[in-house]
């Protein structure tokens, strides 16, 4: 939002380039985490039958 009201012409372009770099970095990091098994598993439902035994 601030880039739209800035009087400097190069800021929106620089911010767009920076956003793509950040996205690429995060995507690569996610792939590394998946490859090494470091991603957390989503919460699982507890087995109520097993808990009552």
Image: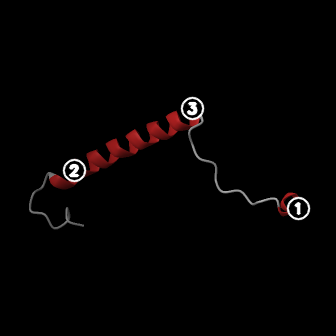
> Which residue is most to the left?
7
> What residue is pinned by disc 3?
36
| Placement of 13 over or under 4, stated as above or below | above
Comparing 29 with 47, the one in front is: 47
Q: Secondary structure at mark 2?
A: helix
- Picture quarter containing residue 34? top right
Q: Earlier in the sequence, mark 2 or mark 3?
A: 2
What whole-number distance in Å separates the C-alpha atoms at marks 1 and 2? 58 Å
Q: Earlier in the sequence, mark 1 or mark 2?
A: 2
Rendered location of residue 35, percent (x, y): 57, 32
What whole-number distance in Å separates the C-alpha atoms at marks 2 and 3? 35 Å
Q: Is residue 15 left or right of residue 25?
A: left
> What residue is pinned by disc 1?
49
> Which residue is most to the right?
53
Q: Is residue 34 left or right of residue 23?
A: right
Mark 3 vs mark 1, foreground winner is: 1
Q: Residue at x 33, y 42 (%)?
A: 21
What whole-number distance in Å separates the C-alpha atoms at marks 3 and 1? 33 Å
Comparing 26 with 41, the one in front is: 41
Circle 3 crowding by C-alpha within 10 Å: few under 14, some 14–19, many from 20: few
| Circles 2 and 3 in contact, beta carbons < 8 Å | no
Comparing 24 with 49, the one in front is: 49
Q: Residue at x 45, y 38 (%)?
A: 29
Q: Which mark is residue 15?
A: none
> What residue is pinned by disc 2?
13
Q: Secondary structure at mark 3?
A: helix
The C terminus: image quadrant: bottom right
Mark 1 vs mark 2, foreground winner is: 1
Comparing 45 with 9, the one in front is: 45
The N terminus: image quadrant: bottom left
Q: Residue at x 50, y 33 (%)?
A: 32
């Amino acid at each position: 939002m601030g880039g739209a009201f800035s009087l400097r012409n190069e800021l929106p372009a620089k911010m767009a380039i920076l956003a793509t770099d950040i996205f690429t970095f995060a995507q690569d990091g996610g792939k590394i985490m998946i490859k090494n098994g470091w991603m957390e598993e989503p919460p699982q439902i507890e087995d109520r039958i097993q808990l009552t035994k």
